[in-house]
Amino acid sequence: MKSEPDLSVRLGRLALRNPVLTASGTFGFGEEYAPVMEVERLGGICTKGLSLQPRSGNPGPRLAETPAGMLNAIGLQNPGLERFARDILPRVRALGPAIVVNIFGSTVEEYETLAARLDALPGIAALEVNISCPNVSCGGMAFGADPAVAAEVSRRVRAATRLPVLVKLSPNVTDIVAVARAVAATGVDGLTLINTLKGTTIDPLTGRFRLGNRFGGLSGPAIRPVAVRMVAEVRQALDIPIVGAGGIVTWEDALEFIWAGANAVQVGSATFREPGAAVGVVEGLARFCRDRGVARLQDLAGRAAPADDISGMENEGPA
């Protein structure tokens, strides 16, 4: 009888039973899914983005399907810190997986205050810092668009809490490695790559935007090659734990991220179609390890090999 493989992972000071988490904004706070899937089998839950004050989000429509993906313009709707701490956290920390609270703000000070106040609450395993939000002090430019600004947010959050800190990077930048390097230098525990790609969709018959906010975040399988590329680039440049995210539907997708250099993964919009998708990824990774005799899944992280040269025509364009 084959022994069970070791799926555990450590992201800095954050220890997880397995490398599969849910992605922020796609799984609520976790309790919404408990009636329809085995939430306790997950490595962790990344909560819906949390701000100091409640937010009602953007006007509708807020979701639109696209080829191999979806656009969302939810606008970070959430109940705010006070209600989360009083009513929601006591319930979700009983679910079993590690609770990673995703936070965002419109100023550096808001991030800092959130981190400090969450530090005092029991049952939180880590913070995930969303730096794809507009910085009101910089004319609306996203915090994650500039390495220096991204580093300042990360530094202030890191100093404000004793909790492990992951920073979720935006793909809407010219050089993801430059941002990753600046953030990693602040002493955070890991990076999440990637957030959604900015996009839009228009009804060709009416000429109307399909989203009430016009623009939204593209997720789903369409962005997976971009996300895997960014994970591989950052892994080649830096020695820091990485959580891969972007278009993961199956365990094979998750394994692609791990080969590229991710230590853990997040399953996001796939849960809209199949609520138990993340549990399926856990099962598939365990089965792969058993079938291949892999004792420890983490041994595969970043071990992708060059493609076999079977044609002698690599990088050649059409004649």
Image (tube, rainbow, N blue to C red):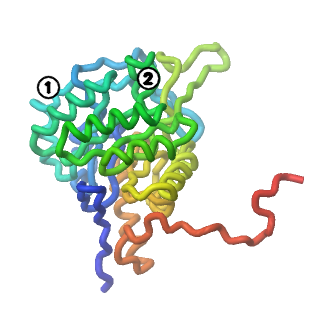
Q: Is residue 195 visible?
A: yes
- Camera-side residue of 111 and 79: 111
Q: x and y percent of residue 280 in the render?
A: 37, 57
Secondary structure at numbered mark 1? helix
- Residue shown at the point (39%, 22%) measured from the top left: 135
Q: Amino acid at mark 1?
A: Glu
Q: Amino acid at mark 2?
A: Arg
- Residue shown at the point (30%, 51%) measured from the top left: 189
Check the image and report above or below for 183 versus 306.
above
According to the picture, the residue beneath numbered tag 2 turns out to be 62
Residue at the outermost bottom position: 1
Crowd class of label 2 (few under 14; some 14 to 19; many from 20; radius 10 Å): some
Check the image and report above or below for 257 versus 48.
below
The quarter of the picture where the N terminus appears is: bottom left
Residue at the outermost right position: 319
Secondary structure at numbered mark 2? loop
**Distance of label 1 from label 2 (alpha carbons):** 25 Å
Q: Is residue 252 visible?
A: no
- Camera-side residue of 16 and 200: 16
1 or 2: mark nearer the eye: 1
- Camera-side residue of 11 and 266: 11
Q: Is residue 33 left or right of residue 26?
A: left
Q: Earlier in the sequence, mark 1 or mark 2?
A: 2
According to the picture, the residue beneath numbered tag 1 turns out to be 82
Q: x and y percent of residue 24 in the render?
A: 34, 39
Q: Is residue 40 left or right of residue 313?
A: left
Query: Which quadrant of the view contains residue 270?
Result: top left
